[in-house]
Image: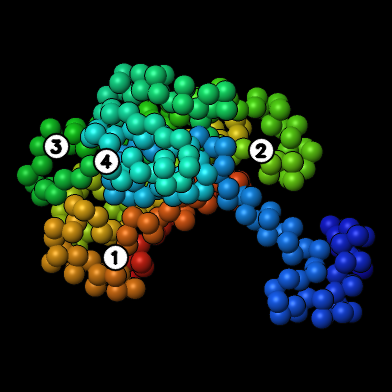
Amino acid sequence: MRSPFVTEETALKWKRYVLNPALVLNHNHQSSSPFHSSTKEKHRDKFSLRGHHALVTGGNQGIGLALAAGLARAGADVAVFDISPPSTEFESISTSHGIRTAYRMVDVSCVPALKQAFEDTIMPFCGDGGLDICITAAGINQVKDFLDTEEADFDKLINVNVKGVYFTCQLAAQAMVRSNSAPSEIKKVISNGSENESKRKSKSIIVIASTASYVAARTHNSSIYAATKSAVRGMVSEIAKELGRSGIRINSISPGYTLTNMTRGYPDLIKQWQSDTMLGFIGMPEDYVGASLYLASNASRYVTGQDILIDGGSTKW
């Protein structure tokens, strides 16, 4: 008995290939299968960000810069908010990938300045299409013993790593809601079938959390940082619940030990980190690009409220 989910046309196609396996085994990789080329194209389209507008906070260096470049390679126009002047690496993104870029110096911990940056930079940059992707990679750390930590230390990290992330997500979601379909239209699209739904432009927010929200670091003390990353990872599922009906997904990525310009100056620490991973090496900023492209694109259209842990196995032993 044929499954009720398999159409007559599909059943006939599979019967044809069962009776003639040579059609499938084409050594020139030019299969005449009717599923072959169309399926490959469909999968490629799911990861394409052509025509999308993205914002990356903290996108001037380190992981944020790698994610901004990754979005550009996938075809997205990319705006960056950062507290420092634009780096030469960021300035090369536009010419290297043939996309538009915008840059705004802003302190994400200052909500009025953040709101102004959205109004003055993001709205004109995105135009009628609106904002499609937001990655919150801006963040700071402080290595300090718990017993020596002062209120000013606490406030500094909370303001950037929690308040800055929270209100960046809120402002991004507001920009997305304005340009997205109304909830009634979303339901109409969904009722017409998943194929039509998959053609809608993805609206995605990606929060950069950390393995510090899972386990304590063996090599240094940074309790406030761990608290902030636990906070942002914890807020994701609640925000996802509220934004889902507006067609907006939000997820987080938790990077493990990563080699950046800042950590390169601590070779002994890097050696210890390498021994803490199952793979024997620590991550590079580019190691998080794949997950970000997946979460930013329609390939993850059924994924929200989740965290992707990328740590070389360091949290699993």
Task: Give how far apart the Cα atoms at labels 1 and 3 are.
Answer: 28 Å
Q: Which mark sits nearer the N-terminus, 4 or 3?
A: 4
Question: Quadrant of residue 263 in the image?
Answer: bottom left
Q: Amino acid at mark 2?
A: Arg
Q: Helix, strand, or loop for circle 2?
A: loop
Q: Is residue 76 above or below residue 243?
A: below
Residue at (39%, 38%) from the top-left corner?
A: 56
Tell me, yes or no, whether the two marked residues, 4 and 2, touch with CB atoms within 8 Å. no
Observer-side mark, 1 or 3, equals 1
Q: Is residue 40 above or below residue 152?
A: below
Mark seen at residue 200: 2
Q: In the picture provided, is 291 more to the left or to the right than 185?
A: left
Q: Can you give x and y, in whole percent of width and height, for residue 255 in the image?
A: 35, 55
Q: Amino acid at mark 1?
A: Ile
Residue that mark 4 sits on:
87
Residue that mark 1 sits on:
282
Q: In the picture provided, is 247 more to the left or to the right than 54?
A: right
Crowd around label 1: few <14 · some 14–19 · many ≥20 (10 Å): many
Q: Which mark sits nearer the N-terminus, 1 or 3?
A: 3
Mark seen at residue 153: 3
Q: Which mark sits nearer the N-terminus, 4 or 2?
A: 4
Q: Can you give x and y, in whole percent of width and height, for residue 280 in the image?
A: 29, 74
Tell me, yes or no, whether the two marked residues, 1 and 2, touch with CB atoms within 8 Å. no
- Would residue 124 be seen by someone viewing this image from the given angle? yes
Q: Can you give x and y, in whole percent of width and height, for residue 157 in the image?
A: 21, 37
Q: Quarter of the image for the C terminus: give it.
A: bottom left
Observer-side mark, 1 or 4, equals 4
Q: Which mark sits nearer the N-terminus, 1 or 4?
A: 4
Tell me, yes or no, whether the two marked residues, 1 and 3, touch with CB atoms within 8 Å. no
Q: Which mark sits nearer the N-terminus, 1 or 2?
A: 2
